[in-house]
Image (cartoon, grey):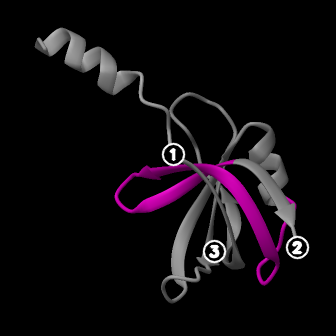
Amino acid sequence: MNSSSQHLNEGSAQPITTTLSGVITKSPSRIKSTTGRPMVKATILAESEKRSSYPLTVVGFDIMALELMAHLRGQRLKITGRMEWNGGYSIVADQIVAV
């Protein structure tokens, strides 16, 4: 396999989508994005059956940014989205539900 077709295969990989829940530990706040799109970031204490709870950054763009801003510290959320590495693990929200 040559490097150009290898590059195409890497770029066509589907992002990993996951669903998790947790309690907001750092209130949502708006962040200035370079593209001008609305962007909000919050931190939750993500819960897992396989390991102890851990802090995870939740990022929302556009309509998900507005949805995330509607929640307060201490609220429990269920989030579906794609995992990313950006100086630490984060989840970019596709769906947010208050539990």
Mark 2 vs mark 1: give the one in front: 1
Q: Which residues are magenta?
A: 70-93
Is the stretch drawn in magenta largely helix, strand or loop? strand
Q: Residue furthest bottom?
A: 52
At a point 82% along the width and 79% down the height, the residue shown is 75
Which residue is labeled 2 in the image?
A: 99
Q: Is residue 24 magenta?
A: no
Mark 2 vs mark 3: give the one in front: 2
Which residue is labeled 3 in the image?
A: 44
On the rendered structure, is 20 left or right of 6?
Answer: right
Of mark 2 and mark 1, the one earlier in the sequence is: 1
At a point 62% along the width and 30% down the height, the residue shown is 36
Question: Of 35 and 59, which appears nearest the observer?
Answer: 59
The answer to whether mark 2 and mark 3 are in CB contact below 8 A is no
Of mark 1 and mark 3, the one earlier in the sequence is: 1
The answer to whether mark 2 and mark 1 are in CB contact below 8 A is no
At a point 13% along the width and 15% down the height, the residue shown is 3
Number of residues whose C-alpha sits closer than 10 Å to that of mark 3, classed few (under 14), some (14–19) or many (20 or more): many
Q: Amino acid at mark 1?
A: Ile
Number of residues whose C-alpha sits closer than 10 Å to that of mark 1, classed few (under 14), some (14–19) or many (20 or more): few
Secondary element under disc 3, as helix, strand or loop, is strand
Which residue is labeled 1 in the image?
A: 16
Q: Is residue 74 magenta?
A: yes
The answer to whether mark 1 and mark 3 are in CB contact below 8 A is no
Q: What is the C-alpha distance between the residues marked 2 and 1? A: 23 Å
Question: Eyeballing the image, is 78 above or below 39?
Answer: below
Q: Position of residue 1 (x, y in %)?
A: 13, 14
Mark 1 vs mark 3: give the one in front: 1
At a point 69% along the width and 77% down the height, the residue shown is 22
Question: Eyeballing the image, is 51 above or below 61?
Answer: below
Question: Of 51 and 41, which appears nearest the observer?
Answer: 51
